[in-house]
Image: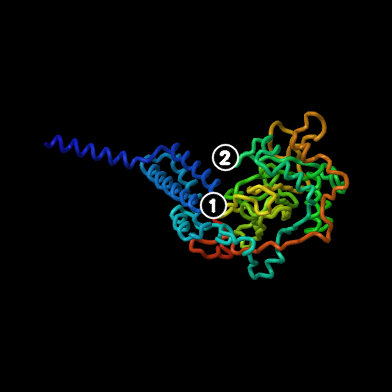
């Protein structure tokens, strides 16, 4: 009987241990990736509920795996699942739940509800702070590019199967490494029609810079760096400073950066702050510009900025009836000095391929080809609509929902939660 009892106890203990044993870290990593893909493709609130449940399961399993094995692979998956879960909670209006999780993880600050759970464009209102409006580090202009130029941009960027994306193997999850192209501004400045729609975008950026900071600053620009993104609604871009070659060898900022939107109502806003690299405090003021077809946002090249992931469920059809339900943008950085890198493969500031000859890439031929004769590439000054970006404050909060205190030093990077 004694032996039978011991055998039964051993069997029970073994079954309990098996039940407590978490899946392998690699299995949970794959589950976490699938949960992210499901989030990117969510079409209903129920889909997001399912993503939340799966992230909670993964987070619990990785905690047990870390405790039982000490395997650092569990910690990596845990951190990713926790970040995604907390963003989902904050954007669902459940910031208190997220704050409790983040506090246990050692965080002390996060992007505020005003940023991560941003107001819809029709609901956005400026914070009552007249002094802050005088410090806006950017300008928003609607209606600058003509319909003809927009149609050409559509042909090259709107569809996920458009030539630009397929030629570069562009992907969102996992993300394609950064790549961009550089164009000497002398090739397009004051030359309507030069380099087709691409030239029109560069000239629009120069015009916005002149409007924003004056002719003297605009005249300093010698190189335009161009890149683009095509992202689903819940995909954002971590807050960062624009820099030559992604900051390798030290941060070197452009004069200004410009975002041209091809789609309306998909994805979150571009957020521009007044924080600069040398600052020792977190940004207190931010300004948001929501995606709107034909809109250009120009801002100082040395300020911290990013793209907030779209909250909730994204639209299944485009709000403007023209564009795709993706957040499609073309970016232009205007540089006083930039080294054009003629290195093999895709990467930062590569020379723009020639649109001439039989070997010209299709995307370059479309983007830089001549516009129909008589085409107006940009609106007249009287047709421009300068929009005041909505002011948001605070940009950062503590984990009790209060603004990050003025004068308090910036916390370590890993203790300030962005969520993406």
Residue 20 is labelled as none
* Residue 410 sits in quarter: bottom right
- The residue beneath circle 1 is 419
Mark 2 or mark 1, which has the lower sequence index? Answer: 2
Picture coordinates of residue 32, whole percent (x, y) = 48, 43
* Labels 2, 1: front one: 2
Q: Secondary structure at mark 2?
A: loop
Q: Kindly identify the residue that appears in the image at 70 percent across and 31 percent down.
A: 344
Q: Kindly identify the residue that appears in the image at 63 percent across and 68 percent down.
A: 127
State left or right for residue 155 relative to residue 306. right
State left or right for residue 106 relative to residue 250. left
Closer to the camera in the image, 136 or 191? 191
**Residue that protrudes farthest toward the left in the picture:** 1
Assess disc 1: are there few (<14), some (14-19) or many (≥20) residues with their C-alpha within 10 Å of its C-alpha.
many
Is residue 87 visible in the rendered image? The answer is yes
Q: Is residue 144 above or below residue 17?
A: below
Picture coordinates of residue 125, whole percent (x, y) = 64, 66
Is residue 309 visible in the rendered image? The answer is no
Closer to the camera in the image, 173 or 13? 173
- On the rendered image, what quadrant is the N terminus found in? top left
* Residue 279 sits in quarter: bottom right
- The residue beneath circle 2 is 174
State left or right for residue 376 relative to residue 347. right
Q: Alpha-carbon distance for marks 2 and 1? A: 17 Å
Q: What colour scheme has been applied to the protein in the rendered image?
A: rainbow
**Cβ–Cβ under 8 Å for marks 2 and 1:** no
Assess disc 2: are there few (<14), some (14-19) or many (≥20) residues with their C-alpha within 10 Å of its C-alpha.
few
Picture coordinates of residue 130, whole percent (x, y) = 69, 70
């Amino acid at each position: 009987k004694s032996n039978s009892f011991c055998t039964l106890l051993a069997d029970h203990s073994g079954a309990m241990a098996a039940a407590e044993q978490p899946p392998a870290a690699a299995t949970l990593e794959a589950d976490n990736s699938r949960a992210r893909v499901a989030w990117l493709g969510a079409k209903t609130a129920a889909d997001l509920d399912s993503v939340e449940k799966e992230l909670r399961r993964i987070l619990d399993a990785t905690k047990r795996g870390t405790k039982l094995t000490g395997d650092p692979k569990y910690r990596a998956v845990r951190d990713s699942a926790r970040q995604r879960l907390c963003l989902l909670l904050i954007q669902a209006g459940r910031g208190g739940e997220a704050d409790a999780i983040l506090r246990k993880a050692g965080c002390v600050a996060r992007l505020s509800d005003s940023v991560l759970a941003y107001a819809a464009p029709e609901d956005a209102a400026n914070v009552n702070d007249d002094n802050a409006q005088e410090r806006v580090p950017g300008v928003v202009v609607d209606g600058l590019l003509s319909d003809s130029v927009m149609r050409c941009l559509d042909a090259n960027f709107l569809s996920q199967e458009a030539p630009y994306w397929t030629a570069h193997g562009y992907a969102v999850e996992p993300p394609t490494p950064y790549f961009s192209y550089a164009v000497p501004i002398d090739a397009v400045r004051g030359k309507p029609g030069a380099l087709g729609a691409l030239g029109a975008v560069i000239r629009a950026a120069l015009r916005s810079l002149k409007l924003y900071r004056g002719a003297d600053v605009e005249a300093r620009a010698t190189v335009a760096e161009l890149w683009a993104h095509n992202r689903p609604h819940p995909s954002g871009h971590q807050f960062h400073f624009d820099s030559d070659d992604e900051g390798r060898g030290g941060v070197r900022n452009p004069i200004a950066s410009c975002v041209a939107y091809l789609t309306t109502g998909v994805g979150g806003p571009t957020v521009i702050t007044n924080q600069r690299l040398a600052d020792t405090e977190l940004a207190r003021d931010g300004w948001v510009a929501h995606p709107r077809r034909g809109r250009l946002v120009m801002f100082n090249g040395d300020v911290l900025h990013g793209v907030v992931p779209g909250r909730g469920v994204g639209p299944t059809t485009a709000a403007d009836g023209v564009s795709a339900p993706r957040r499609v943008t073309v970016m232009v950085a205007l540089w006083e000095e930039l080294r054009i890198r003629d290195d093999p493969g895709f990467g930062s500031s590569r020379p723009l391929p020639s649109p001439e000859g039989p070997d010209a890439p299709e995307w370059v031929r479309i983007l830089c080809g001549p516009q129909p004769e008589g085409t107006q590439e940009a609106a007249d000054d009287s047709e421009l609509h300068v929009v005041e970006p909505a002011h948001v404050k605070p940009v950062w909060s503590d984990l009790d929902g209060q603004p990050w205190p003025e004068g308090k030093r910036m916390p370590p990077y890993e203790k300030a939660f962005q969520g993406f």
